Image: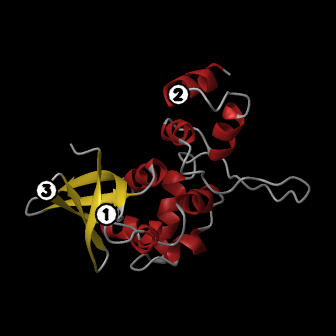
Amino acid sequence: MIAHVRGEVAEKFASSVIVDVAGVGYELTVPLGDYEAVTLSETIKFYTYHHVREQSEELYGFSTLAAKKIFELLITVQGVGPKAALAILSLGAAESVRNAIANSDSAYIAKASGVGKKTAESVIVKLSDKVGLPTHYGRKDEPVQTEIDTTDEALEALIALGYSLADATKALETVDVSLPTARRVTEALKR
């Protein structure tokens, strides 16, 4: 399985990008936000999901590991295929989608192209207990981080291990940022 690709963006079309990795072009179907964020000739890393069907193989790309993990959860829901999952992730940042699921906001999920009300409700029912707690509790006195710092690999690793954004952020608060990523994750897990 191809876990990620790192290379230069050679082409962009429709909702796909071609990433040139040492002379080999990988076509990745990506969420709208990732598509708009990349520029031609930019060196980029995408986490990938290789979807195999009887008559085709497709490679989906995500700029963050958290987005890939949410995609993998979404396609476990009956009636949600890779295209619908990608449409849901195209609604906004991966953390916004995760937070909508955690808050049982089926109206937000139903805004995705090709996703109806019943499918959105099914996503909420099947995944709300798997995505962690909402990052916003309605308290006005305390600012709450609602977006993932995509430059912090330790934070992404903790989220990939199943921590919510709030728990992962709290676990890393007292860990020295100058430590290597693996060490930061280990220290955070001890807490």
In the drawing, does residue 42 fall left or right of residue 18? right
Q: Earlier in the sequence, mark 3 or mark 1?
A: 3
**Secondary structure of residue under mark 1:** helix
Q: What's the CA distance linking mark 3 and mark 2? A: 31 Å
Q: Position of residue 120 (x, y in %)?
A: 49, 69
Q: Position of residue 82 (x, y in %)?
A: 31, 63
Neighbours of disc 2 within 10 Å: few (<14), some (14-19), many (20+)? few
Where residue 40 sits, quadrant-wise, is bottom left
Count of picture labels: 3
Location of mark 1 (residue):
82
Placement of 106 over or under 24, stated as above or below: below
Which residue lies at the image location 63% right of the left edge and 38% below the top edge?
A: 168
Q: Residue furthest left?
A: 55
Location of mark 3 (residue):
24
Which residue lies at the image location 28% right of the left edge and 71% below the top edge?
A: 16
Look at the image and tell me in which quarter the N terminus lies. top left
| Image mark for residue 180 | 2
Q: Are marks 3 and 2 in contact (CB under 8 Å)?
A: no
